[in-house]
Amino acid sequence: MNSEPLTYSNYLKINELLDLQQCRSIDPDSGQPEHDETLFIIVHQVYELWFKQLLHELDYIVTLLDRDEINGGRHHLKRVLKILKTLVGQIDILETMTPAEFAGFRSFLQSASGFQSVQFRELEFVLGVKDRVQVDWFGGDASIRLQTRLEAPTLWDAFVGVLARAGYPVPDDALTRDVTTPIREHEGLQQAIIACYADEGFADLCETLTDLDEGVQEWRYRHVMMVRRTIGTKPGTGGSDGASYLATTLFTPSFPDLWAIRTAF
């Protein structure tokens, strides 16, 4: 049994944490890395930590909605929104790095790319942005994790379920849809959503889900602009088309029915 007293440092593993920023752009003469590589590593490591927390929260929200605990689900959704705002704020920090400063160490990244973030793909799957091909991009444990996410109901499916159990006229095919496919607009389901706006609690849940969808789209937009600002039209280090690829992900909502109903009021 460890007899060492619990401290701030050992509880949070501070020494291990601060040892994780290992730069690759070491100058052979000075022995020092390019100044801005440390910033680049820290921001992306923090992103992955926040992705972990987002998955933790979203999985819990699905559990709460499956138990018809709407108030709890809304509460944790609002926490998710705050985290998304923090993710957008981190882009402001990255944008303090000029293209020349990034170019100083970019070649040392070789084929490493944010395109390879497994947790971000998991987040997309939880939100219903599913693509079977993405599972094949990864191997080993990552592929298993993504396959599990692909086959699992999404946050949207949890919402549709709680709506149906509350007595709203949710069509059967909305409840039994293939959860491995992207979420599509459903006019019959839209009628049930419109009806639920008469209930303040459900209306707030719908609007908070819309806030979540908008927040993800805001992050995507800022990310695209940051990449354009930093590398222009160059291809991504992971072999993608860089900003051009990222731009294709813009303005495609995760929850299209929540946007389609806006003209009905």
Image: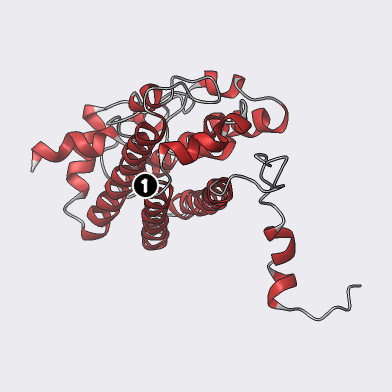
Residue 107 location, quadrant: top right
226 to the left or right of 238: left
The correct choice, above or below, for 15 with respect to 142 in the image is below
Residue 189 location, quadrant: top left
The correct choice, above or below, for 209 with respect to 148 in the image is below
Between 139 and 107, the residue placed more toward the observer is 107
Name the residue carrying label 1.
Answer: 165
Label 1 SS: helix
- Classify the position of the N terminus by image quarter: bottom right
The correct choice, above or below, for 239 with respect to 77 in the image is above
Residue 199 in view here? yes
Residue 163 location, quadrant: top left
Looking at the image, which residue is at 39% across and 52% down? 84
Between 121 and 105, the residue placed more toward the observer is 105
Residue type marked 1: Arg
Percent coordinates x, y for residue 51 in the rendering: 52, 48
Looking at the image, which residue is at 18% across and 50% down? 197
Q: For the residue carrying disc 1, how many other residues have a C-alpha within 10 Å: few (<14), some (14-19), or many (20+)? A: few
84 to the left or right of 50: left
Percent coordinates x, y for residue 37 in the rendering: 57, 45
- Classify the position of the C terminus by image quarter: top left
Between 223 and 67, the residue placed more toward the observer is 223
